[in-house]
Image: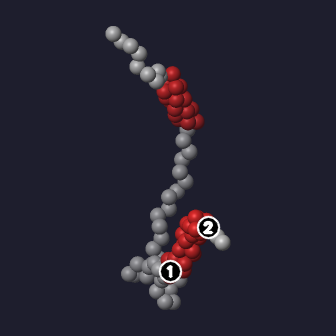
Amino acid sequence: MIAPRSIQRVLLIVTPTVAMLAATPLLQAQSFSAPGAAPNQQTNADGTEIRPPDPGKPEAPGRVAIYVVAVLLSAAAIGVAVMPSKRTHQD
């Protein structure tokens, strides 16, 4: 006979998994487009296609900026590490 505690453990794992698998087709059904339209294609009133803006090529941060940030983070980590953990007697 299977112990009730082990059944609870199995159900604890199986129930969320089954719920996610059951919800997947329902969530996919919500992303639909008009009949006959290409998926994810939107047009303006004059018929031109709407496109997202071009982000361009982002500039890489300079090597100096990377080293400055690394030094500041290292200094902060060392400062916190050498900070005393308890207050001393100051009478």
In the visual, does 31 lie left or right of 10?
Answer: left
* Relative vertical location of residue 85 with respect to residue 16 in this rendering, above or below: above
| Cα distance in 3D space between marks 2 and 1 | 35 Å
- Where is residue 60 drawn, in percent x and y? 56, 45
Residue 47's tag is: none
- Where is residue 30 drawn, in percent x and y? 47, 80
What's the residue type where badge 2 is placed?
A: Ala
Q: Which of marks 2 and 1 is in front?
A: 2
Q: Badge 1: few (under 14), some or many (20 or more) residues near its Cα, within 10 Å?
A: few
What's the residue type where badge 1 is placed?
A: Leu
Q: Badge 2: few (under 14), some or many (20 or more) residues near its Cα, within 10 Å?
A: few
- From the viewer's side, name the closer residue of 4 and 81: 4
* Relative vertical location of residue 47 with respect to residue 63 in this rendering, above or below: below
Q: Do the residues labelled 2 and 1 touch (CB within 8 Å)?
A: no
- Where is residue 78 drawn, in percent x and y? 53, 25
The residue positioned 48% from the left and 27% from the top of the image is 80
- From the viewer's side, name the closer residue of 86 and 82: 86
The residue positioned 57% from the left and 74% from the top of the image is 18
Residue 3's tag is: 2
- Where is residue 66 drawn, in percent x and y? 55, 36
- Find disc 1 in the rendering and name its residue: 26
Sequence order check, earlier mark of 2 and 1: 2
State the SS at label 2.
loop
Residue 43, quarter of picture: bottom left
